[in-house]
Amino acid sequence: MKNFGLFIHPSYLKKENLLKLVKELQQEYDLKFFGFESQREFLSPALDNIISEQTCDQKIDCILVFGGDGTILRAKDIALITKAPILGINLGYLGFLSESTLADLRKSIKDLLKNKYKLQNRMLLSVRLKRNNAVIYSGLALNDAVIYKADSPRLINIRIYSSGRFVLGPRCDGIIASTPTGSTAYSLSAGGPILSPVMKAIVLSPINPHILSIRPMVIPDSEKLMFKVHGLDTPARLQIDGINACEILENDELMVTASKKHVSFIKLSNRTFYAILRNKMHLGK
């Protein structure tokens, strides 16, 4: 590996120190570091090499993402375009998706140069919103796609179908369709189960359902999910990986399936997912 993309949390207060370290690593190991057009203002003038993530003609071997899990979620589109794996450098709190820290960056770079790493593929959700038989939104989710009631004080009615078969119709504040990667995020807060990130499945977690017997469900990745929201007095909203994507109106159809695409993450250590869980979530020894 010689060519590294940089994606940094835009509010990081010590970016000068970080970029100074990057310059040192560049000279020490004869590396090339590239920033992306969306962060040009943030990175200039400290970093000269700025490339477009949309029309990237520069081979990127790895994307170093400095921040927390939210920053990594923002970088997933760049990873899909460049086809480069992500190495998360945790500057946040939990950092489930991060593999290294800023203090260990030099060691991590050495491991990459010595090919002492593995690649771990994470599934994505393909999300499409149809209105009057026309697709008005499409996107990919690494963590989750969420229907939520937005500005309405009332519960909303969501009918869920799996490969054309009716599953259930909870009255709730919303529902989360999560990947295994996202099972430790919003879905977990809603009472959903924890799945190993290398699994292929979709977790459905209702948000504050009116009937207590309605519990989260795990659906095979081969199923094609469809959601319809009924009885809206104000528009509901679709959220993709924590970002508001668009409004949902009465009779809209939200289609959620496992995508054929994936995002690759670099794994440097021998720590298991379960060891990370014990450490991050204080699950005991």
Image (cartoon, grey):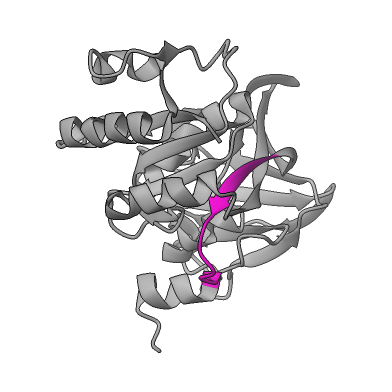
Quarter of the image with the N terminus in it: top right
Which residue is painted at 15% across and 36% down in the image? Answer: 13
Which residue is painted at 76% across and 21% down in the image? Answer: 133
Which residue is painted at 58% across and 70% down in the image? Answer: 215
Name the residue at the bottom extreme: 285
Image coordinates for residue 67, horizontal then vertical, percent: 32, 43
Image coordinates for residue 21, horizontal then vertical, percent: 25, 37
Residue 24 to residue 33: above or below: below
Residue 197 to residue 152: above or below: below
**Stretch in magenta:** 262-273
Image coordinates for residue 22, horizontal then vertical, percent: 31, 33
The quarter holding residue 284 reads bottom left
Query: Depth check: 93 or 51 in front?
Result: 51
Which residue is painted at 64% across and 51% down in the image? Answer: 119
Q: Is residue 1 visible?
A: yes
| Magenta stretch contains residue 24 | no
Image coordinates for residue 150, horizontal then vertical, percent: 39, 39
Q: Is residue 100 left or right of residue 119?
A: left
Q: Tell how many labels.
A: 0
The quarter holding residue 226 reads top right
Q: Is residue 234 visible?
A: no
The quarter holding residue 38 reads top left
Residue 82 to residue 267: above or below: above
Quarter of the image with the C terminus in it: bottom left
Q: Is residue 48 left or right of residue 160?
A: left
Residue 269 to residue 47: above or below: below
Q: Is residue 112 left or right of residue 220?
A: left
Query: Depth check: 277 or 189 in front?
Result: 277
Q: Is residue 166 left or right of residue 249?
A: right
